[in-house]
Image (cartoon, coloured by chain):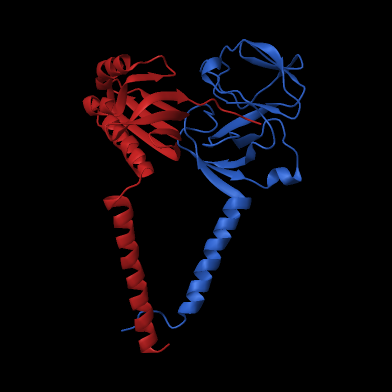
Chain colours: A red, B blue
């Protein structure tokens, strides 16, 4: 192959990489869409829970929050505050996230794996599928309902 | 300055072919999973890598005692690994940890400690298999004991480490 052609291919390649970088920056950093904001909220909540930062974690929930374990905003906060220090290590991994959204209401389905090691050295491993209901309050997406999905087989 | 090797076209074709073969094998023949949880202990320990043969049930039917990998019917998909215990129409019962199928005691050599499950007899649905974990030391309610069909089965576990 001629030198000129090689140079042209290289230039084309680096121009494409550069353009992709700019497109990524504009799409995800400058103007993230609502789905990206929802995803970011969930990731932030998980990171705060892993860091045992309960005060910031609970800010992602609405005051009328309810879940399938009979928790309210208040009972969830008290439960976490009383028990979080018993955890030495929390690792939460979310995958297969699906977001269905209308203007100010969203349903998020995902699969979660959680590993918790207590200060006593006990190890708990849980996995499950959950449905989060979120709505927009003061320009922020907040969780108002959490339920575990039943496993279904044919 | 030399950027590409002399035979770069061949290198690209070889790499693409290699990636395609890997994708084909993973899609149709073999897939690996990482076990999460203790329901199959002591046979398959938590964190083990499990290799599933996705072709085997195209050539032979599911057999009692097979360790199968199956998944939920709807998204988000969750994959499970359990042992096939009973076939369609069979009556299953646990008495003091002993497994009875059609009122006959079944010897389960893969169980280390039997536990003390007591489960009322039930019939496995038509077209379904009853699957169960090897770890019988946890409560019956703490396990998932689904009845699954062939549609749910991904493959047979052929190796785990």
Q: Pick the residue in front: B73 or B5.
A: B73
Indicate left or right for B114 with B46 as reference. right
On screen, residue A91 versus residue B152, left or right, reads left
The quadrant of the rendering that contains the N terminus of chain A is: bottom left
Asked where in the image residue A38 lies, by quadrant, the reply is top left
Q: Could you say where residue A132 lies in the image, as x and y percent from the top left?
A: 42, 29
Residue A94, given in percent of the width and then of the height, sits at 40, 37
Left or right: A60, with A35 as reference point = left
Q: Is residue A4 above or below residue A50?
A: below
The x, y position of residue B126, in whole percent, is 76, 26
Is residue A119 visible in this depiction of the protein?
no
Rendered position, B93 above or below B74: above
The reply, left or right, for residue A85 in relation to residue B57 is left
Q: Residue at x 60, y 36 (%)?
A: B70
Q: Residue at x 49, y 78 (%)?
A: B9
Q: Residue at x 36, y 33 (%)?
A: A92
Identity of the residue furthest to the front in this view: A103
Total labels: the figure holds 0
Q: In which image quadrant can residue A6 be found?
A: bottom left
Q: Identify the image quadrant of the C terminus of chain A.
A: top right
Pick whichever, A34 or B38, lies toward us: A34
Residue A25, compared with residue A16, is above or below; it is: above
Frontmost residue, B44 versus B120: B120
Q: Position of residue A81 (x, y in %)?
A: 25, 18
* Residue B17 is at least partly visible in this image: yes
């Amino acid at each position: 192959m001629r030198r000129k052609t090689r140079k042209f291919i290289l230039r084309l390649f680096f121009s494409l990489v550069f353009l992709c970088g700019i497109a990524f920056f504009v799409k995800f950093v400058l103007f993230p869409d609502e789905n990206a904001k929802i995803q970011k909220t969930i990731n932030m909540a998980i990171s705060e829970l892993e860091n045992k930062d309960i005060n910031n974690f609970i800010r992602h929930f609405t005051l009328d929050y309810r879940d399938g374990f009979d928790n309210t905003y208040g009972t969830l906060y008290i439960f976490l505050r009383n028990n979080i220090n018993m955890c030495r290590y929390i690792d939460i991994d979310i995958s297969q996230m699906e977001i269905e959204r209308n203007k100010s209401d969203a349903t998020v389905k995902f699969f979660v794996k959680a590993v918790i090691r207590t200060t006593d050295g006990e190890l708990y491993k849980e996995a499950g599928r959950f449905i989060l209901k979120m709505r927009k309050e003061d320009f922020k997406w907040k969780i108002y309902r959490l339920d575990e999905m039943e496993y279904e087989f044919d | 300055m030399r950027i590409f090797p002399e035979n770069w076209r061949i290198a690209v074709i070889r790499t693409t072919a290699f990636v395609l073969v890997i994708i084909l094998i993973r899609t149709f023949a073999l897939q690996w999973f990482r076990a999460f949880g203790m329901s199959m202990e002591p046979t398959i320990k938590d964190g083990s890598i499990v290799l599933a043969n996705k072709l085997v049930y195209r050539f032979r039917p599911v057999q009692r005692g097979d360790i199968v990998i199956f998944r939920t019917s709807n998204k988000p998909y969750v994959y499970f690994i359990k042992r096939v215990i009973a076939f369609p129409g069979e009556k299953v019962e646990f008495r003091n940890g002993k497994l009875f199928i059609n009122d006959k005691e079944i010897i389960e050599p893969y169980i280390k400690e039997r536990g003390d499950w007591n489960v009322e007899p039930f019939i496995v649905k038509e077209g379904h298999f009853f699957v169960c974990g090897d770890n019988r030391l946890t409560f019956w309610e703490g396990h998932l004991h689904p009845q699954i069909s062939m549609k749910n089965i991904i493959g047979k576990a052929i190796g785990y480490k």
